Amino acid sequence: MRTIREIQDRITELKKETGVCILAHSYQSPDILEVADITGDSYKLSAAAGETDAKKLLLCGVHFMAETAKLLNPEKRVYEANPDAGCPMAEQFPPEVICAAKAKFPGCAVVAYVNTTAAVKAVSDVCVTSSSAVKIVSNMEQKEILFIPDCNLGAYTQKHCPDKNLHFLPGGCPQHSAITADEARAAKAAHPDALLLVHPECRPEITEMADYVGATSGILNFARKSEHRSFIIGTEISIVQHLALECPEKRFYPISNRLCCPNMRVTSLSDVERVLREIAEGSAAELTLPEDIARDARRCLDEMLRLGG
Ligand code: 13P
Ligand code: SF4
């Protein structure tokens, strides 16, 4: 049986041979992050996919992230390390439900969280990520907005955009939204000196308790730069592990051991090696999207870059 190091060395060789750029979401395991060329949250991955010169991209994360990379870089070849890794929030509402909601809220602009399928983006007006939602919504001309699918991120955005009128569908991240205010209070009671850093996908009663609210990269940067010594991490539990490895002089505690995304655990280091080998052999399955959906979804992402830039 090979060691992790041996698999990583083979991945490095295959990357050189194929010219592939590996993009990995921060929720991936450390052995994958170590071989990735670009790591970060959804926004950073979207932006970086367009900036790299590489013509082939391999996404380690969940399906909508690979779709987003393809939409923003139609000329590049995009591969998924494991196509079974999906996001339940992204698949919560099919495009028909969004079209029916548009009819129910006439005149509303539809703002879609990037955690949606390309088909849902195609029937929406503008995309946002958790780090750009407030800026983009406040830069929009329209006052009436249908914000989908995450009503927790929507409530956070509404609070920071008081001039806008946001409407919601009852959607959200099953992992972040499951965490209760009691769990947050228990974590604070157990670690009274720790700052509470929370992702806006958490319920409003939790973001209201937080010392800092931000997307994954925001939480990572806050914890790295802060002079404070201990932190309760109100996002996916892998971030606790990454920060503990990166900042050994500081203490990091999960808001709850339940905040663990099984979808982000689907991809393994062996998947990364296998797909790179298939790319080298010319047998890897490339991600493709129907042309009409790609065109309309791309417009929604271009609008995100225009209003968030
Ligand atoms: P960000 O990457 O925007 O922080 O979102 C977190 C998440 O749940 C990704 O699926
Ligand atoms: Fe989807 Fe939530 Fe997992 Fe992110 S953490 S991939 S939003 S289920």
Image (cartoon, grey):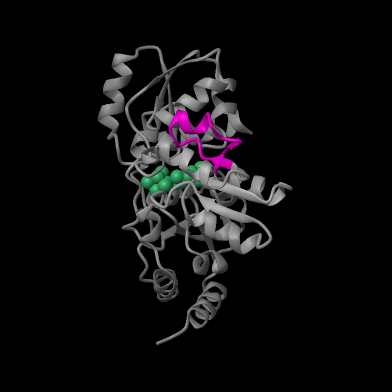
Residue appearing at x 51%, y 69% in the figure: 31
Image x and y of residue 294, in percent: 40, 41
Question: Of residues 146 and 234, which is closer to you in this image?
Answer: 234
Residue appearing at x 52%, y 37% in the figure: 130
Residue appearing at x 33%, y 19% in the figure: 102
Q: Relative to 113, is 51 on the left or the right? A: right
Place residue 276 in its image quadrant: bottom left
Residue 18 lies, with reference to residue 118, above or below; the image says below
Question: Of residues 146 and 80, which is closer to you in this image?
Answer: 146
Question: Of residues 35 and 253, which is closer to you in this image?
Answer: 253
Image x and y of residue 171, in percent: 34, 32
Image x and y of residue 43, in percent: 55, 43
Residue 265 lies, with reference to residue 207, above or below; the image says below
Q: Which residues are magenta?
A: 196-215
Which residue is outermost to the bottom? 1
Q: Quadrant of the N terminus?
A: bottom left
Q: Quadrant of the C terminus?
A: top right
User: Does the magenta run of residues contain 133?
Assistant: no
Image x and y of residue 305, in percent: 57, 35
User: Does the magenta run of residues contain 209?
Assistant: yes
Q: What is the total number of numbered labels drawn onto the structure image?
A: 0
